[in-house]
Image (tube, grey):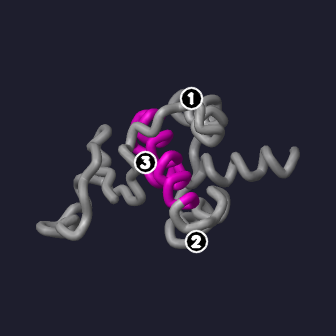
Amino acid sequence: MTSSDFTQSVISLACWRAARSELHHVMLATAMVFKNRAEAEGKDIYQVATEYLEENHEGFPDVRDPQFQQLVSKLDAVLAGLVPDKTGGALYFIAKDRLLPNMLQPFTITVTIGQMVFCR
């Protein structure tokens, strides 16, 4: 295993935990948010993913799950910027079922993908 493999594994885990009940394209959208946030905060995406994992530490994916496999196989393209940002520059995301009234009032919702709301 290389350090690059490890880094991608950590980012994949963060994306899975963020959108575990979603299809892989929603997980990839969370990767885009991690990337956007890293750029906005002057960090690298690995740092942002590990910060997310420090607060969200429940569960591990079944590596045989086709959605997780699709996430892993397409993550390189997102990280390299080869895939257009489908989140509209979002810096945050939240599952629709966790939204409270007026919770996102100070933010601009950029898109909803699956059951995930993306905003900045």
Query: On the rendered structure, is 31 left or right of 12?
Result: left
**Residue linked to disc 2:** 54
Q: How far is disc 1 from disc 3 in space, using C-alphas?
A: 13 Å
Under circle 2, the secondary element is: helix
Are the residues at dot 1 and dot 3 in contact (C-beta closer than 8 Å)? no
Quarter-of-image position of residue 42:
bottom right
Image location of residue 115, percent across then percent down: 28, 44
Q: 83 or 66: nearer the eye?
A: 83
- Sequence-wise, the earlier of marks 1 and 3 is 3
Image location of residue 56, percent across then percent down: 50, 66
Quarter-of-image position of residue 65:
top right
**Residue linked to disc 3:** 19
Instruction: Find out whether residue 24 is within the magenta segment.
Output: yes
Instruction: Name the amino acid type tagged 1.
Output: Gln
**Residue linked to disc 1:** 70
Residue ID at (54%, 56%): 59
Query: On the rendered structure, is 100 left or right of 1?
Result: left
